[in-house]
Amino acid sequence: MRIIMKFGGTSVKDGRSIRHCANLVKKYSDNEVVVVVSAMAGVTDSLTNAAKKCYTEQSTGFIKMFVAELAKKHYDAVRDAVDEPYRSRVMEYIDRLIDELEKVLLGISYLGELTKRSEDYILSFGERLSAPILSSALLSLGVDSLALSGGDAGIITNANFGRAKPLNTSYELIKSRIEPLIKLRGCVPVVTGFIGATEDGNITTLGRGGSDLTATLIAAAIDADEVWLWKEVDGVLTADPKIVPEARLIPEISYQEAMELAHFGAKILHPRALEPLIRKKIPVRIKNTFNPDTPGTVITDSCNSKTGIVKALSLIDRVAIVNVSGAGFDFAEIMSEVFRRFAEERVNVIMISQSSSELNLSMVIDRGDLGRAMKTLTNVDGWNGNVNVSKLDDIAVVSAVGAGMAGTPGVAGRIFSALGKAGINVIMISQSCSEFNISFAVSREDGSKAVKILHDEFCLSRGVEQEIKC
Ligand code: ASP
Ligand code: MG
């Protein structure tokens, strides 16, 4: 079998975990395996903060401290994960990278300027540090391995720094770079997740959580049999166990359902990660690094598995609603102006609802984008005070997802009467034509309660297969 194995940040949180991951890879190394790895847990966040701090505070003392801590974290990991002679070699490599990072941060601090491009460059250090450690851990276990950056592996993107899109030309390139390694040399390439490069060689990132996308891109390029996403959870659950402790593992879920869940806040995988796989029907397995023998969840093409009307529930809190309303204007024109401005300001629109009287457009957006959204919609030339823009802060969006909802009458009725009985006020509703998803907005304090009520209503703690009898 040809398998792409991706290890997330928590799976490589320290040296012992990295060694454990290397052992897992070794166990399956009779197959053709390509490994994709995230930055060690917390590193990407700390790099983001450091970049911002250098730029705003211009403190060289902080930079010294930051790089020393980062270096220590990685040295410690090497000590626990890698044996000699690979240990000294990878230590040297880490030294060089840390040096480079320090210079970049000093540059940002002196210039007082942080562009999207330099931010991506800084963020790339997380994965560029973790990949050689995992690769050296494999070498220590006698598995031939080579660490590659996303760009080296052939992932070429556009120049949309921070959320770069891989170009179609990547597929051929990835194939030509990776296939010879796994076929001819029996080597396990360890590719940095999350990062790519533009055609002229600048490092880009694919958006937070982007290592999943790195894994699926490579899988599609080399026609892998499966993608395994190693995480710190057993698989996809019916709800967030922090909200519903009796949430159950879902053994099988379709691409469509998984994408709906990912878009609506369930942190299963990067929302765009399944796109490269759909045409080739390559299945994804979610497995627990620390509990490797549980079967986990399989995400496949077969969305006709209709067991369970509602399969899973997700919650996004920290969102807000922007409402655009008025009378006596061309609604299409207003809509296009709103979305053009949102695109320009990079306001992320999560959900839309429009009343059929055409007098009202409600949009759920990230709360962090609210200031920019409101600002760009005030004093628009041509609206002449006929359009009102208002906001509702402190909102949560709950989504009920399941392929079995399509064509099953009464699901929406069940959802909203259960909420009504519990005294939860629904502020906005949206159902996509796929009928795989019903989403609604409630006040933030009602969000978790709504998830619990629906989990009970659809008996999800009995397991999805049981739902029909529920
Ligand atoms: N390290 C990146 C992040 O934390 C990418 C990833 O983990 O997938 O977002
Ligand atoms: Mg991460």
Image (cartoon, rainbow, N blue to C red):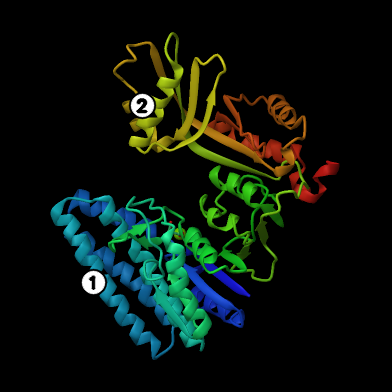
Task: Tell me: residue 6, above or below residue 139.
Answer: above
Q: Which quadrant would residue 370 be assigned to in this image?
A: top left
Quick check: can you spot residue 80? no
Q: Which of the image's four quarters has the C terminus?
A: top right
The reply, left or right, for residue 249 in relation to residue 49 is right
Judging by the rendered image, the residue that carries numbered circle 1 is 99
Of residue 248 and residue 209, the one placed in the foreground of this image is 209
Judging by the rendered image, the residue that carries numbered circle 2 is 374
Q: Position of residue 438 (x, y in %)?
A: 64, 34
Give the residue displayed 22% in from the left and 66% down from the top: 102
Q: Which of the image's four quarters has the N terminus?
A: bottom right
Of residue 213 and residue 129, the one placed in the foreground of this image is 213
Mark nearer the N terminus (1 vs 2): 1
Give the residue displayed 46% in from the left and 55% down from the top: 209
Q: Is mark 1 within 8 Å of ligand 1?
A: no
Mark 2, secondary structure of its residue: helix
Task: Tell me: residue 213, above or below residue 388.
Answer: below
Regarding ligand 1, which quadrant of the image does it lie in?
Answer: bottom left
Whether label 1 touches label 2, CB < 8 Å: no
Q: Position of residue 258 (x, y in %)?
A: 62, 50
